[in-house]
Image (cartoon, rainbow, N blue to C red):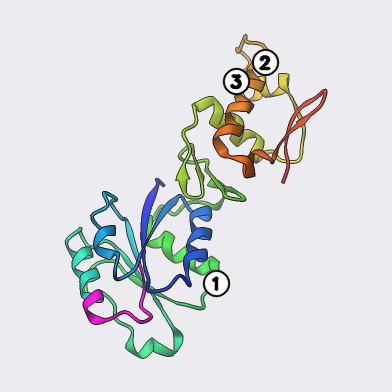
Amino acid sequence: MHHKNILLMSRTSRHHERMRELSHALDVSIALATPDTFSQAIVSGHDFDLVILDSAGMDEETLNAVDSYVANNSYIPVLVIQDEDKLQSLRMPVQGHNDFILATAGEAEFEARCSLLLWPGEESAPADIVTVDNMTINLATYQVYIDGAPVDLTLMEYSLLSFLATHPSRAYSRETLLHRVWGFEYCGGTRTVDVHIRRVRSKVGPQVAAHIVTVRGVGYLFKL
């Protein structure tokens, strides 16, 4: 599985929080558009892998514009969000691999339907994704995201952060971290751990940094 980009097309902000949660659960970035900003969004330089269309209040002109966009881009998959009382007027793209979901559907179903459209046959295994507050770690792709934006970590910074985050609520000495993260052959001093912890904290921001706790006289602990 690799990182994907999603465009949410909606007249309102009613699904914005849902999209934020989706960006934490899956390895995706989210762009938001309304009928007034759709034309700017599709020329923004992003290559979108999925269009999520909230059909509520959409006029025919806007729906046709979305149809044209997906058709001109190798039939990008479309997930239509439909209100249950409007099911009789459900309008789906004729071509391409598409799906629909009720606006009242739960987060698990929403995530599953997006995954099936984004990664058909290779959906991200839940064990590959670690989510803590506004941070998502994708263990399969060695990537970290804060609020959906990628964080530029070195391999060792990533390895240290991912080790601590996947082994929470337990204090590890600097010597243990050197062995577990850097490997038994590493000959540097324990100060290397402190330097990397400081860099990781600065890159992930204060909300996630607060989880990386210094245990005096021992080392570090990732607190949930």
Of mark 1 and mark 2, the one earlier in the sequence is 1
Horizontal side of residue 205 vs 218, given as left or right: left
Q: Tell which tag, 3 or 2, sits nearer the viewer.
A: 2
Residue at image coords 24%, 69%: 66
Horizontal side of residue 200 vs 210, given as left or right: left
Secondary structure under the numbered disc 2 in the rendered image:
helix
Q: Which mark is residue 191?
A: 2
- Counting from the top left corner in percent of width and height, residue 61 is at 21, 78
Kind of residue at badge 1? Gly
Compared to residue 211, the image places residue 78 above or below, namely: below
> Where, by quadrant of the figure, is residue 38 drawn?
bottom left
Kind of residue at badge 3? Trp
Q: Are marks 1 and 3 in contact (CB under 8 Å)?
A: no
Q: Which residues are magenta?
A: 52-62
Of mark 3 and mark 2, the one earlier in the sequence is 3
* Residue 120 in sight from this viewpoint: no
Magenta run includes residue 136: no
Residue at mark 3:
182
Secondary structure under the numbered disc 3 in the rendered image:
helix
* Residue 221 in sight from this viewpoint: yes
- Counting from the top left corner in percent of width and height, residue 52 is at 37, 67
Residue at image coords 46%, 50%: 27
Residue that protrudes farthest toward the front in the picture: 36
Q: Which mark is residue 106?
A: 1
Compared to residue 50, the image places residue 167 above or below, namely: above
- Counting from the top left corner in percent of width and height, residue 49 is at 32, 56
Horizontal side of residue 9 vs 112, given as left or right: left
Residue at image coords 35%, 82%: 57
